[in-house]
Image (cartoon, rainbow, N blue to C red):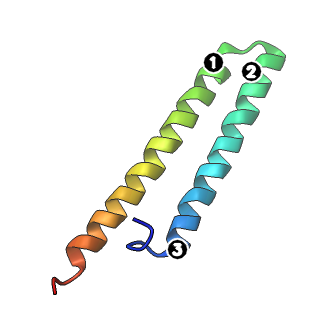
Amino acid sequence: MTEILDESSLMGYFALMLLLDSVAMASKTISHAYDIGVLHDFSIALLFGTALLVGSLILFRGGKTLLETPST
């Protein structure tokens, strides 16, 4: 898939994932420090949601690129 997609867009997707995952880890740390269960659930949802979102974006962009590429 990496030869199909632009490398800069992949780097942007992974940068977004790292940024959101760091927010999730901060949320989890705060939830343990102050015993706030909702923040712990939020961090887990954000971790899995981010992975799902970035994976879906990469597959969508790859499929779109394959469909737009003329057959030889």
Residue for point 49% across, 38% down: 49
Tell me if label 1 and label 2 are in contact, CB under 8 Å.
Answer: yes
Residue for point 65% across, 50% down: 18
Residue receiving disc 2: 31
Task: Specify the quadrant that holds the C terminus.
Answer: bottom left
Going by the image, does 57 lie left or right of 48? left
**SS assignment at label 2:** helix
Residue receiving disc 1: 38
Would you place residue 31 above or below residue 52 in this image?
above
Callout 3 amino acid: Glu
Percent coordinates x, y for residue 45 in the rendering = 53, 29
Distance from Cα at disc 1 to Cα at disc 2: 8 Å
Would you place residue 17 above or below residue 66 in this image?
above
Would you place residue 30 above or below residue 51 in this image?
above
- Of the residues under marks 2 and 3, which one precedes in the sequence? 3
Distance from Cα at disc 3 to Cα at disc 1: 37 Å
Residue receiving disc 3: 7
| Mark 3 closeness class: few <14, some 14–19, many ≥20 residues within 10 Å | few
Percent coordinates x, y for residue 17 in the rendering = 59, 50
**SS assignment at label 1:** helix
Of marks 2 and 3, the one in the foreground: 3
What mark, if any, has residue 19 been given in the picture? none
- Of the residues under marks 1 and 2, which one precedes in the sequence? 2
Q: Nearer the viewer, residue 39 or 48?
A: 48
Callout 2 amino acid: Ser
Percent coordinates x, y for residue 34 in the rendering = 82, 16
